[in-house]
Image (cartoon, helix red, strand yellow):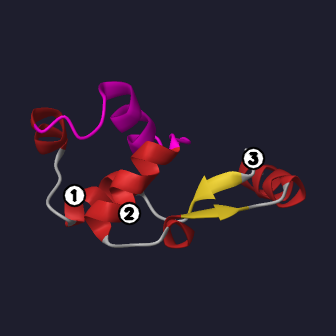
Amino acid sequence: MPIQWKVDPAELLKEHGYTSYRIRKEAIFGQQTYRNLCQKKPVCFDALGKICEITKKQPGQLIEFVSDKKLAKKEDAASV
């Protein structure tokens, strides 16, 4: 996928006092969404918006576009 995280979203939330317990207790994200965040997988715009609100960051500080060619090079380098 050409959109990827620049930061670890789960760690960023923890830095702002949002542990997995608090996220579940306050129903900030659903269980699957939180699991996706922990695995640095894509999430919906609503979840991205909540993260931006909690962390006071803009989406461009959290995610970035990476061309398919760059992704292929990264994957090739990682497999070596």
Which circle, 3 or 2, is nearer the viewer? 2
Disc 3 element: helix
Disc 2 element: helix
**24 displayed left or right of 69:** left
- Where residue 51 appears, as percent x and y from the top left, is 35, 56
Say whether marks 3 and 2 touch (CB < 8 Å): no
Q: Earlier in the sequence, mark 3 or mark 2?
A: 2
Which circle, 1 or 3, is nearer the viewer? 1
- Magenta-drawn segment: 26-44
Q: Residue at x 68, y 53 (%)?
A: 3
Q: Label 1: how many residues lie within 10 Å, few (<14), some (14-19) or many (20+)?
A: few
Distance of label 1 from label 2 (alpha carbons) = 14 Å
* Residue identifier under label 2: 52
Q: Label 2: how many residues lie within 10 Å, few (<14), some (14-19) or many (20+)?
A: some
Q: Amino acid at mark 1?
A: Lys
* Residue identifier under label 3: 79
